[in-house]
Image: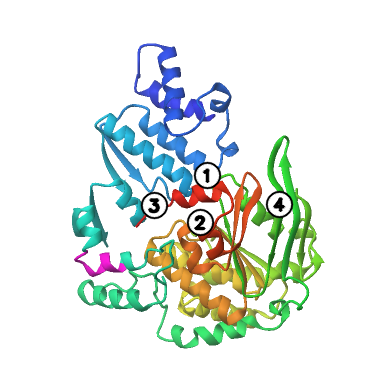
């Protein structure tokens, strides 16, 4: 169904208004309310022609269309960039006040809670552990779990280090003692041996092969003049960046800016681009199918959703074995050993080998997805919004994991996100994309403290303050 029809369907089913024209006017009006064009041309678009942020706003428009008395918002801004999130939050705030609508806002983003809510209720394992005015709960939390969540929130200024294990570990220990839980902070080892073998496993995975360092004069990864257009729509327009061993570059931008498209070009998942992508000075074929086995192994991709990137019918061990089978490495026994080492390296443990994705939490699934990218010992890992669906405590543990992998293996990362607050905690360099162009590029601190482009300044201004 076209997006205009989907909003119109809500009005038709509930008998809104007294005429066709009144319903048509309401469709256009509610689209504008959520920051989208209300014209007929836009209403005729298909969902696949919209970015993720635009799709989310269509869903919000459908919920607002009938002027509800109560609005339940289940993580409505999780997949949105800060600018789009700001528009959506302003829309929610304005419409709830103007129409006297009560809102129940479900989220794991504490900065958003502070920005939009009057009261907050903190839940843990089905129990309400703390409730009260936002200022009282966030400024003076009483429960250890609330304290742990707040300690894990990334801050744009970089005043604290998330995922260092100190504050989170203490809070988790206290929570565990009181409520008998083991995984509040997302750090749930599969067995007692996982922590002891984790470092050794990572070292064994590093190997020599494709994980070797680039030469002194040639960047590990070089993207040069990459451009891509679909008809008249210019998605990427002359992208240039480099990545060295052990370095993390964050690709930052709003929905539709070209972040994921660029990442897929680098990984060979999109072969429509012009320009070049080089690995250790050698230009890569545009399609991963035409790249050599060594080149395919060298660049690995971790997808956004841990709930859809793993085959639910396969065990974790089977899913992690597939890349090794495709690259033709080793015997069945050696492949199993490599997979077990990868599970150890992401602090899951080899007991997870026979578990299925449905048995795992979101954080555990994302760790399994990272382990799958590691089994072939890549030199570059592309992380596409891999923390956007995770709560702040699990996000902190994933950030700590990635930081450790970079240090131990000199693993280079291209980290795609719209979460600016994470930049100081994980990225060496920041590349800001706007309408397919890099408008700011340099060391993270320099870009954040002295942005050269108005778009970057606007993004930073839209970050919810915590």
Say which residue appears at 55% left-offset and 22% top-offset: 40
- Is 267 drawn above or below residue 371 in the view shown? above
Secondary structure at numbered mark 1 = helix
Q: Which residue is mark 4?
A: 270
Q: CA distance from mark 2 to mark 3?
A: 23 Å
Callout 4–callout 2 Cβ contact below 8 Å? no
- Residue at x 50%, y 39% (from the top left corner): 55
- SS category of the residue bearing label 4: loop
* Disc 3 target residue: 464
Labels 2, 3: front one: 3
- Which image quadrant: the C terminus? bottom left
Give residue 285's position: percent from left, percent from top: 80, 59
Which residue is found at the position 44% from the left and 84% from the top? 195
User: What range of the chain is rendered magenta?
Assistant: 141-148
Residue located beneath label 2 in the image: 305
Which residue is nearer to you in this view: 420 or 178? Answer: 420
Q: Main secondary structure of the magenta part?
A: helix
Residue 90 quadrant: top left
Q: CA distance from mark 4 to mark 2?
A: 19 Å
């Amino acid at each position: 169904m076209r997006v205009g029809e989907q909003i119109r369907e809500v009005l038709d089913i509930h008998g809104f208004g007294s005429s066709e024209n009144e319903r048509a006017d309401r469709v256009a009006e509610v689209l504008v309310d959520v920051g989208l064009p209300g014209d007929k041309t836009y209403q005729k678009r298909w969902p696949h022609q919209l970015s993720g942020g635009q799709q989310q706003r269509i869903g919000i428009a459908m919920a607002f269309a009938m002027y509800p008395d109560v609005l339940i918002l289940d993580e409505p801004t999780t997949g949105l960039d800060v600018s789009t999130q700001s528009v959506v939050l302003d829309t929610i705030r304005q419409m709830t006040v103007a129409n006297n609508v009560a809102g129940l806002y479900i989220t794991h983003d504490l900065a958003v809670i502070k920005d939009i809510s009057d009261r907050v209720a903190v839940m843990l394992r089905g129990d309400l552990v703390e409730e009260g005015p936002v200022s009282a709960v966030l400024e003076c939390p009483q429960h250890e779990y609330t304290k742990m969540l707040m300690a894990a929130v990334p801050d744009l200024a970089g005043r604290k280090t998330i995922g260092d294990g100190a504050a989170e570990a203490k809070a988790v220990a206290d929570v565990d003692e009181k409520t008998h839980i083991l995984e509040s902070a997302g750090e749930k080892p599969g067995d007692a041996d996982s922590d002891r073998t984790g470092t050794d496993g990572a070292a064994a995975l590093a190997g020599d092969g494709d994980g070797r360092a680039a030469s002194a004069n040639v960047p590990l990864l070089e993207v040069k003049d990459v451009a891509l257009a679909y008809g008249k729509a210019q998605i990427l327009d002359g992208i240039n960046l480099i990545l060295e061993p052990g370095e993390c570059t964050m690709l930052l931008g709003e929905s539709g800016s070209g972040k994921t498209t660029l990442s897929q070009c680098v990984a060979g998942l999109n072969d429509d681009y012009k320009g070049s992508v080089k690995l250790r000075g050698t230009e890569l074929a545009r399609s991963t199918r035409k790249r050599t086995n060594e080149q395919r192994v060298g660049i690995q991709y971790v997808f956004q959703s841990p709930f859809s990137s793993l085959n639910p019918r396969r065990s974790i061990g089977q899913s992690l074995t597939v890349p090794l089978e495709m690259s033709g490495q080793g015997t069945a026994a050696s492949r199993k050993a490599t997979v077990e080492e990868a599970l150890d390296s992401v602090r899951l443990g080899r007991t997870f080998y026979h578990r299925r994705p449905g048995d795992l939490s979101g954080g555990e699934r994302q760790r399994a997805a990272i382990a799958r990218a590691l089994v072939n010992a890549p030199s570059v890992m592309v992380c596409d919004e891999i923390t956007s669906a995770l709560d702040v405590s699990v996000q902190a543990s994933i950030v700590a994991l990635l930081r450790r992998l970079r240090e131990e293996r000199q693993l280079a990362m291209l980290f795609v996100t719209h979460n600016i607050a994470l930049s100081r905690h994980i990225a060496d360099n920041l590349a800001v994309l706007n309408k397919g162009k890099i408008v700011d590029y340099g060391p993270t601190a320099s870009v954040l403290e002295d942005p050269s482009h108005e778009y970057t300044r606007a993004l930073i201004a839209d970050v919810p303050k915590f």
